[in-house]
Amino acid sequence: MLHKDNLIEIGKVIKPHGIHGEMSFTYTVDIFEVDDLPFFIFEIDGILVPFKVSEYRIRSDSTGFLTLEGIESEDEARAFDGLAIYVNQSVLATDEHLNLSLEYFVGFQLTDVLQGKVGVITDIDRSTANVLYVVEKEDSELLIPVADDYIREINHDLKEIVVKLPEGLLDL
C-alpha cells in the first residue's frame, strides 16, 4: 500500500501537450538516468495512484514531456493539470547518480556534526558567485555556502543534511 510518507515529490504536471495524452511537466529531481524508470505516483481525489511511464522527453534542465500508460487524449491528460509527481523514496536511495536540484533541499534540516541543529533551509541564494543555503535559525537568517566538501550525509527520509562546517562559520 502506498503511503505519502514514503514518497518524494519530484515535479508537477503543467498542462497537456498535444492531443494524444502527452503532458508538459517541471521537475526538481532528475531521476531520468535511472535504468528502469519507475511508476510515477499522483494524488487523485485524495488517493495515491501509480501510473507507468510510457515515454518521456527532456526539454531543459527542469522541464519535459511525459506520456503515461492509459492516458491517450488531451482531456484525460488535462485531469493531471497541476498535480504533483511523486516517486517512492527507494528510487532515490538506490541511485547515487541522480541530479537533485538545490531547490529540492528547501525544507531540509541542516545539522552540523559538532554544533547540532543549525536550522531549516528556506531558500537558495544564487545572487553571488557562491551559491548559498538560506537557513532560518530561531529569529535570524544564516547564509551557508553550498559545498560538497561540507556534506557528510543526506537523509531523504528525515529531510536532513548533516554537514561539518568550518570552525567559526556559524559565528559570522
Image (spheres, helix red, strand yellow):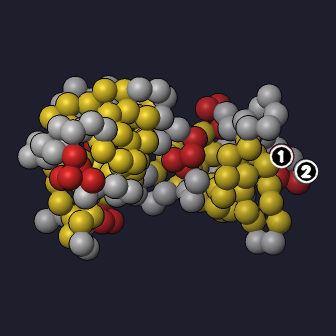
Q: What residue sits 88% from the left and 54% below the top?
A: 171
Residue 138 position within the rendered picture, expressed as x and y whole percent measured from the top left: 76, 71
Q: Residue furthest right?
A: 172
Q: Quadrant of residue 92?
A: top left
Is residue 95 visible in the rendered image? The answer is no
Residue indicated by mark 2: 172
Residue indicated by mark 1: 169
| In-image side of 123 versus 62 (left or right) | right
Residue 11 position within the rendered picture, expressed as x and y whole percent measured from the top left: 40, 47
In which quadrant is the N terminus drawn? Answer: bottom left
How busy is the neighbourhood of tag 2: few (under 14 within 10 Å), some, or many (20 plus)?
Answer: few
The answer to which of 62 and 142 lies nearer the viewer is 62
Q: What residue sits 38% from the left and 42% below the top?
A: 25
Q: Mark 2 and mark 1 in contact? Answer it, CB < 8 Å.
A: yes
Q: Is residue 33 above or below residue 37?
A: above
| In-image side of 112 versus 108 (left or right) | right
Residue 8 position within the rendered picture, expressed as x and y whole percent measured from the top left: 37, 54
The type of residue carrying mark 1 is: Leu
Residue 154 position within the rendered picture, expressed as x and y whole percent measured from the top left: 49, 46
Helix, strand or loop status at disc 2:
loop
